[in-house]
Amino acid sequence: MDVSKPSSESEMNNLTKDSGIVKEDEKLAIYNDSTGKEHRFSAICTHLGCNVVWNDLEKSFDCPCHGSRFSGLTGNVINGPANAPLENKDNDN
Ligand code: FES
C-alpha cells in the first residue's frame, strides 16, 4: 500500500492550479491560484450564512441562496446582496 505523504497542502486537497474547493465539514473555501499558492476563506456567505460553492468557470465562490459571488483570489464581493468579503482564513496573514 502506498502511504506516501502529499508534499504540499495543495496536493493534500487534491487541488490543481487555478481551481478551488469547498470543504463543507470544515466550512472552508480554498482557492489554489495560478502560481500554486492557496487562499483560504470561510465558506460561510456573509449575507445570511449559507455555504458557498466553487464556480470553476468564473473562478469564484458563489452562494446558492441569493446569488452572492466572491472572488476566489481575494474573497471580495463580486456580486451582492452580500456586502462584506468572505472571512480570510489564510495562516500566513
Ligand atoms: S446567504 Fe448567501 S447570498 Fe444570501
Image (cartoon, rainbow, N blue to C red):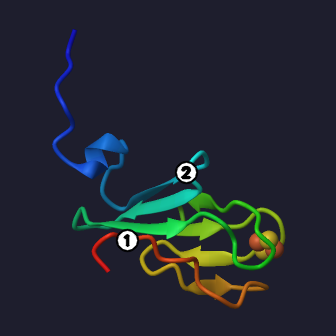
Q: Which of 29 and 89 lies nearest the eye of the viewer?
A: 89
| Label 1: which secondary element | loop
Residue appearing at x 61%, y 85% in the figure: 78
Residue appearing at x 21%, y 37% in the figure: 6
Q: Quadrant of ligand 1?
A: bottom right
Question: Is 6 on the left or on the right of 63, as rendered?
Answer: left
Q: Is residue 46 among the parts visible in the rendering?
A: yes
Q: Residues within 10 Å of mark 1 (few under 14, many from 20)?
A: few
Task: Kindly identify which numbered label has been placed on residue 26.
Answer: 2
Name the quadrant of the N terminus. Answer: top left
Amino acid type indicated by mark 1: Asp
Amino acid type indicated by mark 2: Glu
Residue appearing at x 19%, y 32% in the figure: 5
Indicate the position of residue 87 as horizontal and vertical percent values: 55, 77
When asked about the image quadrant of residue 63, the answer is bottom right
Indicate the position of residue 81 as horizontal and vertical percent values: 79, 85
Number of marks: 2
Residue under circle 1? 90
